[in-house]
Image (cartoon, rainbow, N blue to C red):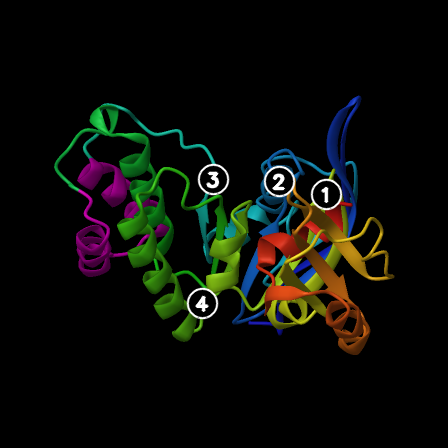
Amino acid sequence: MSKQAIVLNGLTKNYGKHRGINDLSFSVNAGEIFGFIGPNGAGKSTTIRTLMGLIRPTSGNATILGHDCQTQASVIAKDVGYLPSEDSYYENMKVCELLQYTADLYGMNCQTKLHELAERLNLDLSRRISDLSLGNRKKVGIVSALMVSPKLVIMDEPTSGLDPLIQQAFYEILKEENRHGTTIFLSSHVLSEVQKLCDRVAILKSGKLIGTQSIKELRESGYKKISVSSKAEIPNGFFNLDGIANYSESKDKTSADFMYNGDITTVMDKLHALPLTDVFLEEPSLEEIFLHYYE
């Protein structure tokens, strides 16, 4: 397998007036867990469907495992486990029959892994697809994507509909697959999910790539979250400093919360001038850091 599992070069898909994706260029290294993040409607699913050869790009190109996504989609499919954001199954089949059908398409005997994954995800193999809840349908897709032991897994919003306990089991399964060498590419609008799993992320907004960063870089962006409480009112404009963001204060103006990116001694000097009752400095959550990419 090449050093880069996925490469996008200027990938663009126009839908007329409707938003698509515009000039996306980034790569996913072999063996990493890569997050593709952004709010709903940012273009994540369009990107993934283009990668899988399900829709044609307007311009640009992409490769998966060294193969062109448009002209060699059938070759790519042999080595990729794919979970779409929305399923489309044969409703009259039982879960076990559908998964066996998937194994047959790959030409593999997956019985051992199929049953192991089903047990860990609490999936009843004897039920009909038509009787399944959204969460259980998602489990079918997860088992289908992973049981064939693919080189690369591409998952679009994989945890939507899963209850918290099953989500935790799913995270552990993904980490194990990754330790065995599987490259994982997953889209999500749930940043805490990405934070738990991913090595790097690409951030998408309105169909455009804002940036690609490691989780460590995102966390170490320099921002600190500061909460202060004072015995007296905080004067108007007291925290008008470069690097202050997301400033909010209580109605009685005796407490304030804000993000700060700059020389910490500057803000500490300001704090010394207040009759403080409490001060709290912490590392902001990925969600809070992420908001800065949307301002």
Q: Earlier in the sequence, mark 4 or mark 1?
A: 4
Q: Locate residue 155 relative to residue 250 in the image: left or right.
A: left
**Residue 16 in picture, x, y percent from top left:** 79, 23
**SS category of the residue bearing label 4:** loop
The residue tagged 3 is: 84
Query: Which kind of residue does numbered mark 3 sit on?
Result: Pro
Span colored in magenta:
95-123
Q: Which is more N-terminal, label 2 or label 3? A: 2
Q: Name the amino acid type tagged 1.
A: Lys
Give the labeled residue for mark 4: 182
Q: Which mark is residue 39?
A: 2
- Please tell me how crowded label 3 is: few (under 14), some (14-19), or many (20+) other residues with Cα within 10 Å: some
In the rendered structure, which amino acid carries the disc numbered 4?
Thr
| Residue under pointer 1 | 205
Q: How many marks?
A: 4
* Contact flag, marks 3 and 4 (Cβ < 8 Å): no
For label 1, the crowd category at 10 Å Cα-Cα, with few meaning under 14, some 14 to 19 and many 20 or more, is some
| Location of residue 199 with respect to 165 vertically, above or below | below
**Which quadrant of the structure image shows residue 42?**
top right
Query: Where does the image place residue 229, in percent across and percent down from the top left?
Result: 62, 58
First in sequence, mark 3 or 4: give its number. 3
Asked if disc 1 and disc 2 are in contact, CB closer than 8 Å, the reply is yes
Q: Residue at x 59, y 58 (%)?
A: 286
* Label 3 secondary element: loop
